[in-house]
Image (cartoon, grey):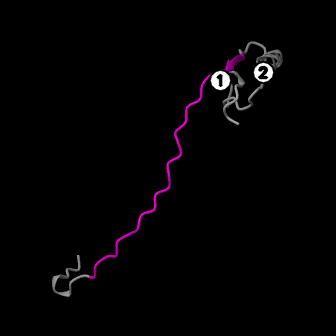
Amino acid sequence: MDNLEFWLVWNPEGHRPPQYQHHSAKDAADEAERLAAINPGQSFYVLQATELRRTADAPVQAVTLLKRPEPDPDDYMPF
């Protein structure tokens, strides 16, 4: 269900982007505090996802290929 709100904890000095989706602002704030306590001097932001954008699935299109005509032997060029 990607239409439910969630929160992320982000460290601008981190080596990888945040991936864990917290289900409440409090859970995310608690995690930010925990991380800040074990990483003195670093900042941990609590971010709320507010909107989602995605492209619609493109429909599958079936295309029938045309049969290639046989070459005319009188008009044949090898290149």
Query: Which residue is the extreme one toward the top?
Result: 41
Query: Which residue is the extreme one toward the left?
Result: 74
Q: Amino acid at mark 2?
A: Ser
Give me the residue at 53% from left, 46% from top.
Answer: 57
Q: Please say whether residue 78 is one of the residues in the magenta stretch.
A: no
60 and 24: which is toward the camera: 60
Q: How many marks?
A: 2
The quadrant in which residue 33 appears is: top right
Residue indicated by mark 2: 24
**Residue 39 in the figure: left or right of residue 10:** right
The quadrant in which residue 16 appears is: top right
Badge 2 local density, few (<14 within 10 Å), some, or many (20+)?
Answer: few
Quadrant position of the N terminus in the picture: top right
Residue 11 x, y percent position in the rendering: 69, 21
Q: Over which residues does the magenta segment extend? A: 44-70
Dot 2: what SS?
loop
The quadrant in which residue 9 appears is: top right
Residue indicated by mark 1: 49
Dot 1: what SS?
loop
Give me the residue at 46% from left, 62% from top.
Answer: 62
Badge 1 local density, few (<14 within 10 Å), some, or many (20+)?
Answer: few
**Among the two numbered marks 2 and 1 on one chain, the one whose residue lies closer to the N terminus:** 2
Q: Amino acid at mark 1?
A: Ala
Residue 27 x, y percent position in the rendering: 81, 20
- For the residues labelled 2 and 1, say whether their Cβ atoms are less than 8 Å apart: no
Residue 44 x, y percent position in the rendering: 72, 17
